[in-house]
Image (tube, rainbow, N blue to C red):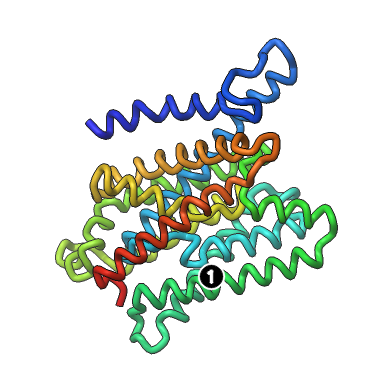
């Protein structure tokens, strides 16, 4: 019943996002070229939001299952920072204009290298079994280093490059080129389908590696595949819309609390919920202090920061973190 209500609310929220604009709620005058252009722009941003939000949210679900950590998400683990560094290099070098696939591919490679670095740092002196706390600390440190390198690259960039990177870093759903959207939609589809195929093994891994082994699951293979798919989703989202944090943290928690922990339902519903959440955040970003538009990454950070602290405090009381 809850799933039906959720699915029924989705189209209503999407239509509401199309109606929200700097001048309030309403349909632009479709008899004028400007009205048609405004509606077309809102529709393009809706598609960008659905794609980016779905990728970030599904990525968060997979990271949380693999690490058995309710605080895991691409932004916290440094994956988004690594992808951002790769995307920044691609933008400043002009590769993203020449080859549409270069931006998500470079972001993905950079994100994978960052994840390997985070895991290696967290594993020091732990016999290859890093704790949740050490993973988060290592992720924050590596993410800060990536941000510092990005700042250095931005400070030495041309005026045009500076404008492009700064606006992208703040998080924006401004439509990318059609070729970039096509490339990103293909990669996101691969990531979402691949993650859903791993739903049953993820259900077993949440109970622990030993339990997964007794069920005939190759835990090491599933973890590697899951990490690659989650990183692909996060990197594609970052390359498409910039640094938008906490979507992969908030949405999976709300969906899991509402519909249960079964990943066969959790992954598709989180993807859908993440897309709708980001679309609504974007609608608020362009209407709250109109005509000034707030970067959507600022809106998600203002919502996600307190949410993260509440979860951290709750889990520390329950001794989840060791």
Residue sticking out furthest to the right: 159
Residue sticking out furthest to the top: 31
The quadrant where residue 218 appears: bottom left
What secondary structure is marked by label 1? helix
**Whole-percent x, y for residue 70 in the image:** 33, 61
Taking the image as shown, residue 60 lies to the left or right of residue 179, namely left
Residue sticking out furthest to the bottom: 125
Residue nearest the observer in this picture, 245 or 318: 318
Residue nearest the observer in this picture, 267 or 299: 299
Disc 1 marks which residue? 114
Residue at image coords 43%, 60%: 73
Q: Looking at the picture, does residue 120 appear above or below residue 13?
A: below
Residue nearest the observer in this picture, 82 or 257: 257
Residue at image coords 52%, 52%: 302
**Crowd rating for badge 1 (residues with CA inside 10 Å; few <14, some 14–19, many 20+):** many
| Residue 277 shows in this picture | yes
**Whole-percent x, y for residue 48 in the image:** 57, 39
Taking the image as shown, residue 99 lies to the left or right of residue 212, namely right
Residue at image coords 51%, 67%: 78
């Amino acid at each position: 019943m809850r799933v039906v209500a959720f699915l029924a609310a989705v189209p209503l929220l999407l239509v509401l996002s199309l109606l929200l604009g700097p001048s309030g709620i309403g349909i632009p005058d479709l008899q004028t070229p400007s009205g048609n252009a405004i509606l077309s722009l809102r529709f393009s941003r809706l598609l960008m939001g659905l794609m980016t939000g779905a990728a970030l949210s599904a990525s968060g679900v997979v990271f949380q299952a693999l690490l058995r950590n309710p605080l895991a998400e691409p932004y916290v683990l440094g994956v988004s920072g690594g992808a951002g560094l790769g995307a920044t290099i691609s933008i400043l070098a002009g590769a993203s204009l020449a080859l549409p696939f270069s931006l998500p591919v470079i972001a993905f490679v950079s994100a994978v290298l960052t994840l390997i670095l985070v895991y290696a740092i967290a594993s020091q002196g732990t016999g290859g079994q890093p704790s949740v706390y050490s993973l988060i600390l290592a992720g924050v440190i590596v993410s800060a280093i990536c941000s510092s390198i990005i700042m250095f690259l931005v400070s030495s960039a041309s005026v045009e490059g500076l404008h492009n990177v700064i606006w992208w870093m703040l998080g924006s759903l401004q439509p990318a080129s059609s070729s970039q959207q096509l490339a990103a939609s293909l990669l996101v589809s691969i990531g979402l389908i691949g993650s859903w195929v791993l739903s049953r093994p993820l259900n077993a891994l949440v109970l622990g590696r030993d339990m997964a082994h007794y069920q005939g699951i190759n835990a090491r293979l599933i973890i590697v595949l899951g990490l690659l798919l989650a990183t692909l989703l996060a990197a594609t989202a970052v390359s498409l819309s910039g640094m938008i944090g906490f979507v992969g943290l908030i949405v999976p928690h709300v969906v899991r609390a509402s519909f249960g922990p079964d990943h066969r339902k959790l992954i598709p519903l989180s993807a859908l919920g993440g897309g709708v959440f980001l679309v609504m955040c974007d609608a608020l970003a362009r209407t709250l202090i109109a005509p000034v538009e707030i970067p959507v990454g600022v809106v998600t950070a203002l919502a996600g920061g307190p949410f993260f602290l509440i979860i951290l405090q709750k889990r520390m009381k329950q001794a989840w973190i060791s």
